[in-house]
Amino acid sequence: MKARPYGIVCPITHACEVLEPGWTIPILSEMWGGSTRFNDIKRGVGNISPALLTKRLKELEAQGLIERIKDKATGQVDYLRTQRAIDLEPALDALAKWVQCNTDARQALKDADVSNLMWHMRDLIDQDQLPNRQVVIWFRFSDPKLEYNTYSVLSRPGTPFELCSSIPGFDVDLFVETDRVSLSSLILNRTTIGREIDEGRLFLSGDAVLARTMDRWLYRRTKENRRQIWQLDEERTSP
């Protein structure tokens, strides 16, 4: 008998039942990135209410995908992925690759949460590639109707990045003017710095060295062959 690719006992169907509830995959992805505490998970995931996040975490714990650990001395609670969730990593990577190579970049990124994007900027800038001194990088987004359209990243050698939604009381080294689609596309390797500058979607001013080395200190996703990635504003026809 020929094997059926789908149906009532299909493993893919069951996987959908487990992962389908809203925010499940973003929560697991954020935890994969290293977040273990409630507020960090919430900030990393984006526009999820505390009540819904609490509900989803309880569901994931009941499904054996995460473990809730409470420190009896401090009362601090951490959430850790179980091996069952860790085993999902190749599947999540495959989904990400499919999106990168088979979806229009502008459509995929037009609703990206700027606050969430900048929260992750702490992990998207390579401090080792910055000058060995205090550095302030100011980001301004041209997108309309943002709660905050300016963010500053403060880097000091040997200390974690500091992020705020205004210019701090220090001189700014590099001004970066962009929009959510342009910056997200750079990070996801769906465009290049030179192309965004040429298209007028990215403006860099200030420290010439920081501007020139942006391709070194800003993270670029490299898990896919760039020739296969659907580039920003690339026109593709149906096969």
Image (cartoon, rainbow, N blue to C red):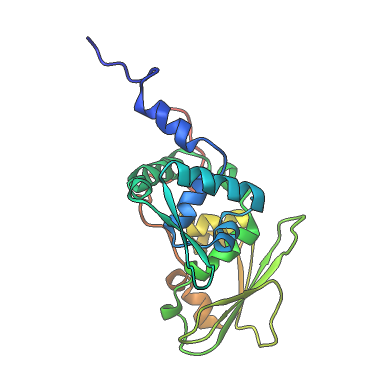
> Looking at this view, is 216 or 53 the one in front?
53
Q: Is residue 22 above or below residue 175?
A: above
> Looking at this view, is 27 or 159 the one in front?
27
Task: Report the residue at 52% width, 39% height from top.
Answer: 235
Query: Is 42 left, or right, of 190 in this rendering?
Result: right
Q: Residue furthest front?
A: 72
Report x, y in % for residue 13: 42, 26
Report x, y in % for residue 101: 42, 42
Task: Report the residue at 36% width, 42% height from top.
Answer: 91
Please identify the quadrant where the N terminus is shown. Answer: top left
Task: Report the residue at 71% width, 60% height from top.
Answer: 142
> Looking at this view, is 88 or 217 the one in front?
88
Task: Report the residue at 49% width, 84% height from top.
Answer: 159
Whether residue 180 can be seen here: yes
Q: Is residue 127 above or below residue 93?
A: below
> Looking at this view, is 224 or 89 the one in front?
89
Report x, y in % for residue 217: 45, 73
Query: Is 223 left, or right, of 60 in this rendering?
Result: left
Report x, y in % for residue 38: 56, 60
Whether residue 179 can be seen here: no
